């Protein structure tokens, strides 16, 4: 499905067709998470409460193993 970014007030937004929203079970006000992938791809998923806990744990691990992760990144 090809969609186009549109100006919405002072912002730019992506308008999802109602048919797509219905298929995905989404409605106005739902929170989504956008992630960048390889070669400029995007992934959009529904936000869940588990996401907050996952990020909290990830931050703890990254803090505890900062030196190791830095060395591995080189």
Image (spheres, rainbow, N blue to C red):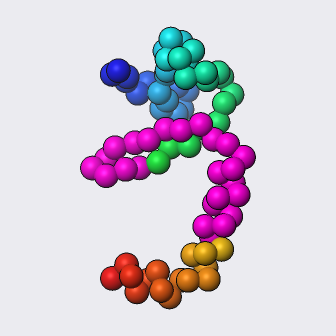
**Which stretch did the figure color magenta?**
36-59
Q: Is residue 34 visible?
A: yes
* 24 sits to left or right of 70: right
Relative height, residue 32 to residue 7 (above, below): below
Q: What residue sits 59% from the left and 37% below the top? A: 46
Relative height, residue 11 to residue 57 (above, below): above
Q: Does the magenta run of residues contain 54?
A: yes
Q: What residue sits 50% from the left and 11% below the top? A: 19
* 44 sits to left or right of 28: left
Q: What residue sits 49% from the left and 22% below the top? A: 15
The quadrant in which the N terminus is found is top left
Residue 17: x percent and y percent?
49, 15
Toward the top, the furthest residue is 19
The quadrant in which the C terminus is found is bottom left
Toward the left, the furthest residue is 39
Residue 70: x percent and y percent?
44, 83
Q: Is residue 7 visible?
A: no
Q: What residue sits 63% from the left and 60% below the top? A: 55
Relative height, residue 14 to residue 38 (above, below): above
* 73 sits to left or right of 33: left
Q: Does the magenta run of residues contain 12?
A: no
Quarter where residue 31 is shown: top right
């Amino acid at each position: 499905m090809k969609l186009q970014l549109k100006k919405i007030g002072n912002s730019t937004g992506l308008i999802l067709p109602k048919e797509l929203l219905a298929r995905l079970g989404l409605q106005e006000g739902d929170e989504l998470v956008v992630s960048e992938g390889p070669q400029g791809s995007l992934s959009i998923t529904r936000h869940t409460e588990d996401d907050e806990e996952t990020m909290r744990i990830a931050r703890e691990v990254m803090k505890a193993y900062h030196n190791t992760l830095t060395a591995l990144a080189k």
